[in-house]
Image (cartoon, rainbow, N blue to C red):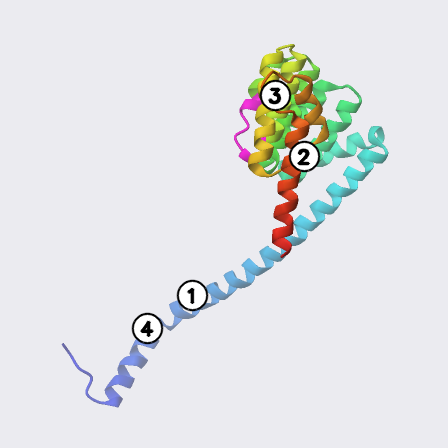
Amino acid sequence: MDVLTDDHEREQVVRKWWHENWLSLTVGIVIAIALMIGYKQYQVYKNDKAAANAYEMSQIQTALVLKPTESIEKAQAFIKEHEDIYGSLLSLDLASTYIAQKDYDKALDSANFASKNGGKLVAPNASLMAAHILTEQKKYDEAIKIVNGIESKAYEVEKQELLGDIYVAKNDLDKAHDAYAKALDACEAQKIAINSLLQMKADSLIKDGDKTAFSRAQKLQEQINASATQVKK
């Protein structure tokens, strides 16, 4: 192994190495700095773009509530340019507008758009809406298939309650009873208060041996209140 024996020799080696490599090193540093600056600028651009999209979306959402008929075209234009979460969220609002107008085909198209482009955050809600629309169209089997395709456990209550509603519309009351029971079970498992409408639906189909949904709701609410008290302590 060669050993550099004095400072002069070491200095000469360093100078030679720098002379041969300074250009590539300098270029590399410049590129790295440029990338860092570019990345920060890109992040600022993305944040500004996201804020602008969210603001424009909220403006159109408000317009759809206040002046639905006059705002549909503007909503459609925004959605066409945004095959993303912003377009998907607005598409759900547009679907609600179409439902109010009983234009179920367009409402279903809007819900399907949201399901396709909204990602995991929006897709379950879009699927629930699509199933509601199909139920209005008396396409019960299609609606059931869509609801059963929702995999997120976070939507188990809504999923089972809607299945119960579909089975009631289909006049399959035994399956409706079982679906509402599963919705009650999901509320208890997730410590979610049982809403009064679900209570009425479940109790309207109550069978021998069932606890009333009303009594289950009261007991669950007591548990939720007790847990909240413990957290405060």
The residue positioned 26% from the left and 84% from the top of the image is: 10
Spatial distance from mark 2 to mark 4, Cα to Cα?
A: 81 Å
Q: Where is residue 123 in the image (x, y as percent from the top left)?
A: 59, 32
The residue positioned 75% from the left and 34% from the top of the image is: 75
Discs 1/2, front: 2
Q: Earlier in the sequence, mark 2 or mark 4?
A: 4
Q: What residue is pinned by disc 2?
A: 218
- The kind of secondary structure element at disc 3 is helix
Q: Which mark is residue 20?
A: 4
Discs 3/2, front: 2
The residue positioned 66% from the left and 32% from the top of the image is: 217
Q: Which of 134 and 15 is in front in this view?
A: 134
Spatial distance from mark 1 to mark 2, Cα to Cα?
A: 68 Å
Q: Nearer the viewer, residue 47 or 114?
A: 114
Q: Is the magenta stretch mostly helix, strand or loop?
A: helix
> The disc labelled 4 sits on which kind of residue?
Glu
Q: Residue 163 carries which label?
A: 3
Discs 2/4, front: 2
> The disc labelled 2 sits on which kind of residue?
Gln
Q: Earlier in the sequence, mark 1 or mark 3?
A: 1
Q: Which mark is residue 28?
A: 1
Q: Give the range drawn in magenta.
A: 146-156
- The kind of secondary structure element at disc 1 is helix
Q: Residues within 10 Å of mark 4 (few under 14, many from 20)?
A: few
